[in-house]
Image (spheres, helix red, strand yellow):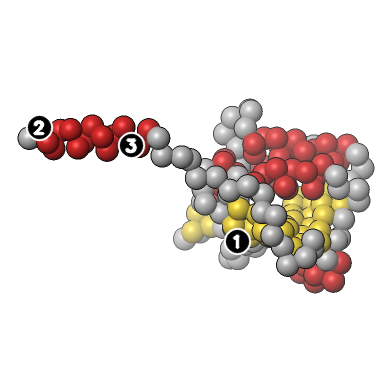
Amino acid sequence: MLLATIALIFFLLGLLFVPEVSFPICSYSASDKVIPIVNDNYFNVTFNEISNAKKSIDIILYEFKWYDSNNSVVKMRNALISAVQRNVSVRLFIDRTNYRDQETELSKENRKTGNYLSSKGIQVKYDEWTQTTHDKLLIIDKETIILGSHNWGYSAFERNNEASVLIKDKKIAEYYTNYFETLWG
């Protein structure tokens, strides 16, 4: 019994010294045109791109929600509002799925987000009730693409393991711009 107790104490002490797993912004890329983004690096990279947008930001999202007034999601929301104030066109196409003819909680949150952003000058459209839009896509100035697994919520920005990529390529941006325009209608 004493040996098991000592082993447990050493195990618990060992947990105190386990380093947190963190990934720096990746220095590898196939070229400077493709940059992998993982976990909480997404916020910094995306925030920087939005803050430097000159003409347009087109976004397609499955989820965009915040719960309090001072976290990374609110900062991203405010960066979009600042872009509008700089005369950057900002459009958001977002999911509003229903289930068995009932609006889902996600859809209610997205509608709340859309109403707020609309009041701040951001153009917002929703997908059809029968269609789920599961994209996480940004097109900035029709030349930079950010896409991957990151929803726009606290967990995706600060807690989850997520993988996305930034692509600086006008031909690829043109492809995704056409896709966006098809959904935007």
Mark 1 and mark 2 in contact (Cβ < 8 Å)? no
Residue 72 in picture, x, y percent from top left:
64, 36
Does residue 168 lie above or below 172 as drawn? above
Measure how far apart labels 3 and 2 are at the Cα level: 18 Å
Q: Say which residue appears at 70% left-offset and 35% top-offset.
A: 75
Residue 87 in picture, x, y percent from top left:
92, 42
Residue situated in front as seen by the camera: 42 or 20: 20
Measure how far apart labels 2 and 1 are at the Cα level: 54 Å
**Which amino acid type corresponds to the residue marked 3 in the rendered image?**
Gly
Residue 157 in picture, x, y percent from top left:
60, 44
| Horizontal side of residue 28 vs 88, given as left or right | left
Dot 3 lies on which element? Answer: helix
Q: Residue 117 is drawn in which quadrant? A: top right
**Which amino acid type corresponds to the residue marked 2 in the rendered image?**
Leu
- Which residue is label 3 attached to? 14
The residue mark sitting in front, 1 or 3, is 3
Residue closest to the far left: 1
Residue 42 in picture, x, y percent from top left:
66, 48
- Which residue is label 1 attached to? 134
- Which residue is label 2 attached to? 2
Q: Quadrant of the N terminus?
A: top left
Q: Mark 2 or mark 1: which comes first in sequence?
A: 2
> In the rendered image, is residue 79 in sight?
yes
**Which amino acid type corresponds to the residue marked 1 in the rendered image?**
His
Label 2 Cα crowd, 10 Å radius (few <14 / some 14-19 / many 20+): few
Q: Mark 3 or mark 2: which comes first in sequence?
A: 2
Dot 1 lies on which element? Answer: loop
